[in-house]
Image (cartoon, rainbow, N blue to C red):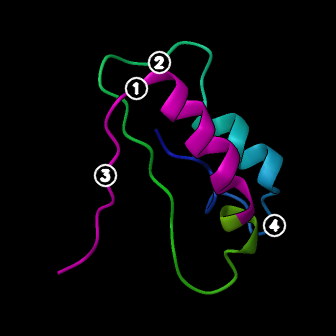
């Protein structure tokens, strides 16, 4: 799932959370969030997104560029 944090230049944290936390989870959910400059709203959305998935899944991983 794309969180939508790059779709709109000024995406709000609430919109990012809404896109990243669907009512019905796919079997193996993957959420794409972007880093870099001007990501304050993405960072602000993270606590709620993390709580949502911790309540529903048992595994979380972070992907980084190597």
User: Considering depth in this image, is 29 or 1 the residue closer to the camera?
Assistant: 29
Q: Position of residue 40 (x, y in %)?
A: 74, 74
Which residue has dot 2 on it? 25
Q: Position of residue 56 (x, y in %)?
A: 48, 22
Q: Earlier in the sequence, mark 2 or mark 3?
A: 2
Of the numbered discs in the image, which one, if any, rests on residue 57? Answer: 1
Residue at position x 62%, y 87% from top? 37
Real-space Cα separation, disc 4 to disc 1, in angstroms: 29 Å
Describe the element under mark 1 as helix, strand or loop.
Answer: loop
Q: Which residues are magenta?
A: 44-66
Describe the element under mark 2 as helix, strand or loop.
Answer: loop
Real-space Cα separation, disc 1 to disc 3, in angstroms: 12 Å
Vertical comparison of 17 with 23: above or below: below
Real-space Cα separation, disc 2 to disc 3, in angstroms: 17 Å
Which residue has dot 4 on it? 10
Which residue has dot 3 on it? 61
User: Answer yes or no: do the residues labelled 4 and 1 have beta carbons within 8 Å?
Assistant: no
How packed mark 2 is, by other alpha carbons closer than 10 Å (few <14, some 14-19, many 20 or more), is few
């Amino acid at each position: 799932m794309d969180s939508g944090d790059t779709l709109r230049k000024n995406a709000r944290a609430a919109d990012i959370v809404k896109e990243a936390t669907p009512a019905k989870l796919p079997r193996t959910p993957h959420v794409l969030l972007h880093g870099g400059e001007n990501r304050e709203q993405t960072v602000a959305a993270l606590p709620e997104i993390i709580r949502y998935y911790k309540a529903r899944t048992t595994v979380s991983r972070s992907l980084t560029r190597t």
